[in-house]
Image: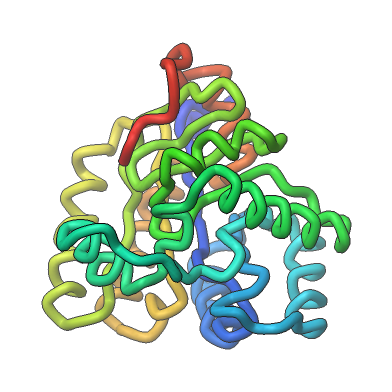
């Protein structure tokens, strides 16, 4: 970090659901971000999005992202929750809230470890550095949390926390994220993010978390563009791995007994 006024405050911009099927929208989103500022990004990669096969063109596209200085992080294996909800409330969480994409929300330790290892091996085959794992929809079962202990990830995250691994020390920092499924959700998320940004104006970290559809809606795009521009005025943009290293040394309190829930 530099010695200017931004040195005690960081900003991370994270692109979710990066996969062959979403690549056109992801590229449009990257171009829109570049229109605001050139900055390092963290791309959350799904190796087999919805069960799709390998795509060499997509993998070459990721090579170029690494060359630019972006971070690639693992974002599940398929991004699909193919288990059976246990009750109505579990159904609401896994089918309505996440639209069936909370892949790691109910996995056993062995199931989670298998998927994490498959993603890790895919990264290794391409010589891509791998520091972080972020579960789809930020939902991690107890089995997933235990499975993470068997890997050398430097961090994971929930909607409201950045968690250093293996210590499990955590920094509370609510993500700025948009919901685009309906006009009502879009309006609410714009208002929510405006309020959150104000409430967290003195926080050590701002987490702007974008999804491919966030480039499609003018009001959403105007909102996150303004948030990004304003944050960059007094914050230094870092990848999540870079921010985690800095914040672990400066702000993250001592580790608790285990990763907490969202």
Instruction: Give the percent coordinates (x, y) of residue 75.
Output: 56, 59
Of the 4 image quadrants, the one containing the N terminus is top right
Q: Nearer the viewer, residue 25 or 58?
A: 58
| Residue under the image location 31 percent in, 43 percent down | 174
Instruction: Give the percent coordinates (x, y) of residue 221.
Output: 35, 75
Residue 100 image-quadrant placement? bottom left
The colour scheme used here is rainbow
Instruction: Give the percent coordinates (x, y) of residue 12.
Output: 50, 48
Q: Is residue 128 above or below residue 233?
A: below
| Residue under the image location 19 percent in, 82 percent down | 182
Instruction: Give the percent coordinates (x, y) of residue 232.
Output: 45, 49
Q: Is residue 234 above or below residue 218?
A: above
> Can residue 239 be seen in the rendering of this structure?
no
Q: Residue furthest top?
A: 254
Q: Is residue 125 left or right of residue 200?
A: right
Q: Is residue 117 left or right of residue 89?
A: right
Q: Is residue 36 left or right of residue 100?
A: right
| Residue under the image location 40 percent in, 53 percent down | 106
| Residue under the image location 78 percent in, 62 percent down | 122
């Amino acid at each position: 970090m530099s010695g200017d006024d931004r040195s005690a405050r960081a900003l991370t911009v994270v692109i979710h659901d990066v996969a062959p099927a979403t690549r056109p929208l992801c590229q449009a989103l990257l171009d829109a971000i570049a229109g605001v500022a050139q900055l390092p990004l963290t791309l959350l990669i799904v190796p087999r999005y919805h069960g799709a096969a390998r795509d060499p063109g997509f993998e070459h596209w990721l090579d170029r992202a690494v060359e630019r200085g972006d971070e690639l992080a693992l974002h599940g294996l398929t991004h699909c929750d193919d288990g059976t909800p246990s009750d109505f409330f579990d159904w609401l969480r896994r089918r309505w809230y996440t639209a069936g994409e909370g892949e790691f929300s109910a996995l056993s330790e062995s199931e989670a470890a298998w998927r994490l290892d498959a993603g890790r091996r895919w990264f290794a085959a391409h010589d891509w550095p791998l520091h972080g794992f972020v579960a789809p929809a930020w939902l991690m079962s107890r089995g997933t949390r235990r499975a993470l202990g068997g890997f050398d990830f430097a961090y994971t995250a929930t909607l409201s926390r950045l968690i250093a691994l293996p210590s499990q020390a955590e920094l509370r920092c609510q993500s700025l994220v948009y919901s685009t499924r309906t006009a009502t959700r879009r309006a609410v998320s714009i208002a929510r993010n405006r309020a959150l940004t104000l409430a967290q104006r003195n926080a050590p970290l701002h987490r702007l978390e974008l999804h491919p559809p966030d480039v499609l809606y003018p009001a959403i795009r105007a909102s996150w563009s303004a948030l990004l521009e304003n944050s960059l005025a007094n914050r230094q943009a870092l990848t999540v791995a870079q921010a985690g290293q800095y914040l672990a040394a400066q702000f993250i309190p001592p580790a608790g007994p285990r990763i907490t829930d969202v």
